[in-house]
Amino acid sequence: MKLSEFKKHLSTVQSLNFVHPNGYNIARHFHITEIGLISKQFIDCGGAVHSEKMANIQIWVALDVDHRLTPYGLLNILDISQKILKNEDLDIEVEYQTETIGKYGLYFSADNFHLTNTQTDCLAKDKCGIPIEKPKKQLVELGSNNLGSCTPGENCC
């Protein structure tokens, strides 16, 4: 999710609800402990140079159960963060503490902000000799294209 989309959704909700990928709601007394600019330059295993920038939002749950950040309050924090984000419409990465600090993507649905799992990947599969996986298809997806079709009882399988 981009910062602009996040702000748009913040202006439409009455309360802040973040949902972990495992399905549980993050305690509503969470804190946003920092909003940062992450700039990463790296070389993949094939030798290509890459760079990326993203906005980082850190969520932390403390023991002060009376704390409740409002959407308006978070919009104010985002406004202050423009000192370092420079009005760039960056992708958002969310940090949240579970067994270790997890890094998550973000999407919005039904008045909730959902943390999404992120994955590692090889960016140079062609140079590493990693075979590219072919997409798996269900037999019903093949339908009656050039391969024909087969239904139970037709003795064609």
Image (cartoon, rainbow, N blue to C red):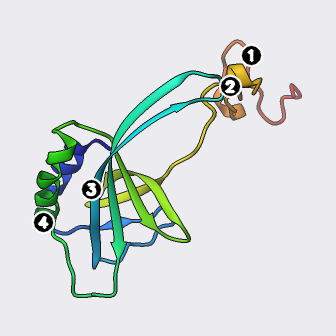
Left or right: 66, with 132 as reference point: left
Residue identified by numbered label 4? 73
Q: Nearer the viewer, residue 149 or 66?
A: 66
- For the residues labelled 1 and 3, say whether their Cβ atoms are less than 8 Å apart: no
Q: CA distance from mark 1 to mark 4?
A: 58 Å
Picture coordinates of residue 34, whole percent (x, y): 28, 61
Judge from the rendering whether residue 132 lies leftward or rightward of residue 118; answer left or right. right
Residue at 28 percent across and 41 percent down: it is: 2
Q: CA distance from mark 3 to mark 4?
A: 13 Å
Q: Secondary structure at mark 1?
A: loop
Q: SS of the residue at dot 2?
A: helix
- x, y (%) of residue 38? 36, 45
Callout 1, which amino acid?
A: Leu
Tell which circle, 4 or 2, labels the residue nearer the N-terminal end. Answer: 4
Q: Are marks 1 and 4 in contact (CB under 8 Å)?
A: no
Q: Amino acid at mark 2?
A: Lys
Q: Amino acid at mark 3?
A: Ile
Marks 1 and 4, the one that precedes in the sequence: 4
Between the residue at mark 4 and the residue at mark 2, the CA separation in whole angstroms equals 44 Å
How busy is the neighbourhood of tag 2: few (under 14 within 10 Å), some, or many (20 plus)? some
Which residue carries the number 2 mark?
125
